[in-house]
Image (cartoon, helix red, strand yellow):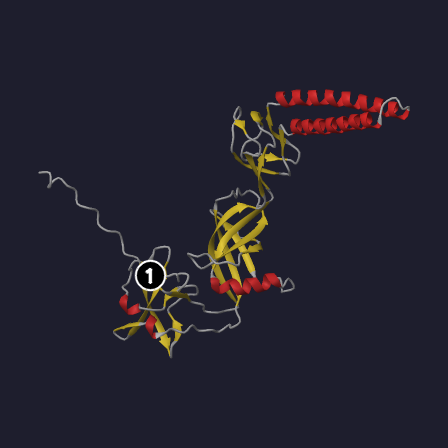
Amino acid sequence: MTACSKQEPPPPGPDFRPVKVKEVLLGGKYQERVLPGEVQASDRAVLSFQVAGEIESILVRPGDEVKKGDVLAQLDDEVYQQQLEVAQAEYNLAKVLFERSAELVKRGVISKNDFDKSKSNYTVATAARDRAQNNYDYTKLYAPYDGLISVRHKEEFEFVQAKESILGIQVENLVDVNFQLPEQYIGSYQLRMQHQTAEPHTVHAQVNFSGKDHWFDAVVTELSTVADKNTGSYTMVLRLPMPEHINAFPGMTAKVKLQVPTSDHTQTPAIHDSALVEEDGQQFVFVLRPDQKKVEKIAVTVTDGKLQSGLKDGDLLVIAGAAELADQQSAVRWVKERGL
């Protein structure tokens, strides 16, 4: 009975076959690509107190707009107030004694050594007073620039150490979108970023935010020079003004549209025999659908090794082992490992 009650193990998941692919480029004046992106804050900072203490109040919440110099949070300043009063009293005494010694040394009443000691005590008291004043001022947290509170790390009445994260702030009038640029386009973008005199309309970038129909113009601000070890692509960052009536917060998804000019307006991709299969006189190829993690069998027309019809610009053509594949077979893009 015990053996009969055992549950059957779950069936194994799909066996994803790695396939080597090449993106189909059909040419034209521009090659248009739409890639997934992610919103990130344009300029952001983590705010913290410069001294330790108990948080007395936090005056803002995530999403609040603030102006430069606004008080955002405050520590219980009683201890620092007392330290400042003691330091001020010691400074006042040291100052009086120094000024008195300066008169007495002129008249020869005290020695130069006693005067130097009084001067040293005054200098030390001045530094101690200034330090106590700074510590007292540090019990208030101010906005470093106009922006938007992005995150709140602590709550009121918590005890925090110096430089422990309290709030996050970001610029509200600009937004960045980062995405992965396929390696075949990296050279074109690097060249145009290095030569600032290039024609301003030879490279286009636009951003679309989820749920919106409009595309917004953006400029390239960063382009990594090291490829991602898993995808072989490069991280690019676009910047644009924050669109009106759109809440674009860090972490939200976006779409990036790129238009890269081609040097050959009439190029026809070559299709090698290893990418072709033939059935009943009809030629077929396999195209990887990365979102579905499957390959799709598509009828094509190939003449003298050149594609005539059947594929679309941007399709991921399987270029090896087509004869061993089946329509809708589970597959993933093969990525060359380092050192191979």
Could you tell me which quadrant the N terminus lies in? top left
Q: What residue is shown at x 41% (from left), y 74% (from top)?
A: 270
The residue carrying pointer 1 sits among few (fewer than 14), some (14 to 19) or many (20 or more) residues within 10 Å by Cα, namely: few
Question: Quick check: can you spot residue 267?
Answer: yes
Which quadrant of the structure image shows residue 194?
A: bottom right
User: Could you say which is closer to the camera, residue 31 or residue 180?
Assistant: 180
Which quadrant of the structure image shows residue 115?
A: top right
Side of 220 where 276 appears, left or right? left
In the rendered image, residue 258, in percent from the top left (x then y), is placed at: 51, 59
In the rendered image, residue 172, in percent from the top left (x then y), is placed at: 59, 41
In the rendered image, residue 338, in percent from the top left (x then y), is placed at: 41, 61
Could you tell me which quadrant the C terminus lies in? bottom left
User: Could you say which is closer to the camera, residue 88 or residue 44?
Assistant: 88
Above or below, 20 against 291 in this view is: below
User: Could you say which is closer to the camera, residue 187 or residue 327?
Assistant: 187
Above or below, 323 against 123 in this view is: below
Q: Residue furthest left?
A: 1
> Residue beneath label 1, please?
18
Element class at badge 1:
strand
In the rendered image, residue 205, in percent from the top left (x then y), is placed at: 55, 57
Q: Residue furthest right?
A: 107
Q: How many marks?
A: 1
Instruction: Report the amino acid beneath label 1.
Output: Pro
Which quadrant of the structure image shows residue 147?
A: top right
